[in-house]
Amino acid sequence: MDPQSPWHRLGWAAPWLLFQAFPVADLVRTPRPPLVIAVAALALLLFTVAYLRIFNRMFGGCGGVQREMVLVAVVGVALAVWLGPAWSGLMIYVSAAAAASLPERWTWPAVVGAAAVCAGVIGAHGELGGMFILPVICLLTAFALRGTRYLVSVNAELTQAREELARSAVAEERMRFARDLHDLLGHSLSLIALKSELAGRLAERDPARARQEMADVEDAARRALAEVRDAVSGYRQVRLAQALVEARSALSAAGIGLRAPAVGEPLPAAADAVLGWVVREATTNVLRHSGARSVVVDLATTDDDVRLTVTDDGRGGTGPRGAGLSGLEERVEAVGGRLEAGPVDGRGFRLAVVVPVRLAAEPAVAR
């Protein structure tokens, strides 16, 4: 259930409604004139609505319940004094409402006052010995609601702080990326602008020199384009170790076990990135389609290549490859590797990738 929904917020108040069994039973069983019964029932309904409204607004962060608090206090005291000990339990609601809505300096005077009214009504009818627990419950309820109110406020502050940290992290990352692009392109674009202007002035006087300047412009533009591609690729790069950590978290949340090796010696950047994408795509497929209960990742490294295998015990599958596997195959082939994917004997699906270590870095730079 949504923590911000009215039903969730009213959950804080609902348990205390059990104490209304006493006034309701008294209203049904005690002979009274019909007018008295009708007035008492209407007042009890009004009291309950105001009480629930206090909790709905306060735990929803709305505030502004002064009128409801006055109504709960006045009606509760009036009913308890008018109708006797069976109605003195309404003071528990007054204590709860005071603890949930009043400022700290007013909470305890109001709670002690409610407990005193409860004890006074019971004592006036000579039943304090048998019902002494009700004034005590008034105090205990206030302690419980003050603690709950504090926890709710702390949780709200933590949520706001977490959201602010997330916004700050996003803004900082945007600033970093903007700064990196500025550093990469500032010099190259300035050089292109200067040489283009020079070539324009030399076009008629010295065509050969103008052609040389334009050749320099082309080289500078190509270098800038390569630098931007490298920056963007690094900006959204996925590393194998990082992908394994993310996969373990995601699979664990879905109740799927993962057995994976620890990444030892650092792999070449291009191979590491491709294998990271392999783990991420395999994890996505397991979560979406497989119905698996366990996943095994094997990593074998030689002097010539790196082999990564991801096997699950799910339903397998023999249909055509989707966009995810097709795109992954393109990534693997771009660094000179090969990809194999298909169901295993019995039950499950295997995704295997072999990436040549020595050739992996070359196509990545030329991309």
Image (cartoon, helix red, strand yellow):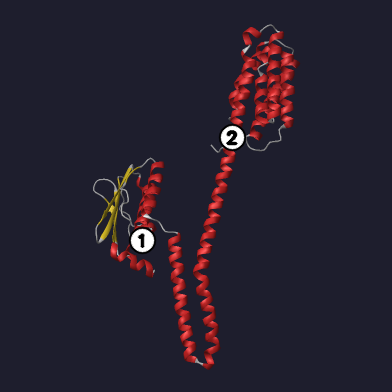
Q: Nearer the viewer, mark 2 or mark 1?
A: 1
The residue labelled by disc 2 is 152
Report which quarter residue 87 is drawn in.
Answer: top right
Instruction: Left or right? Give the position of 131 relative to 43.
Output: left
Q: Position of residue 58 (x, y in %)?
A: 65, 34
Q: Is residue 317 above or below residue 92?
A: below
Q: Which mark is residue 269?
A: 1
Q: Please state the total of marks drawn on the protein image.
A: 2
Q: Position of residue 352 (x, y in %)?
A: 28, 55
Report which quarter residue 326 is drawn in.
Answer: bottom left
Q: Compare marks 2 and 1 and give the one earlier in the sequence.
A: 2
**Dot 1, crowdedness within 10 Å: few (<14), some or many (≥20)?**
some
Q: Give the camera-side residue of 144 and 322.
A: 144
**Dot 2, crowdedness within 10 Å: few (<14), some or many (≥20)?**
some
Report which quarter residue 105 is drawn in.
Answer: top right
Q: Secondary structure at mark 2?
A: helix
Residue 10 at least partly seen: no
Q: Is residue 13 above or below residue 210?
A: above
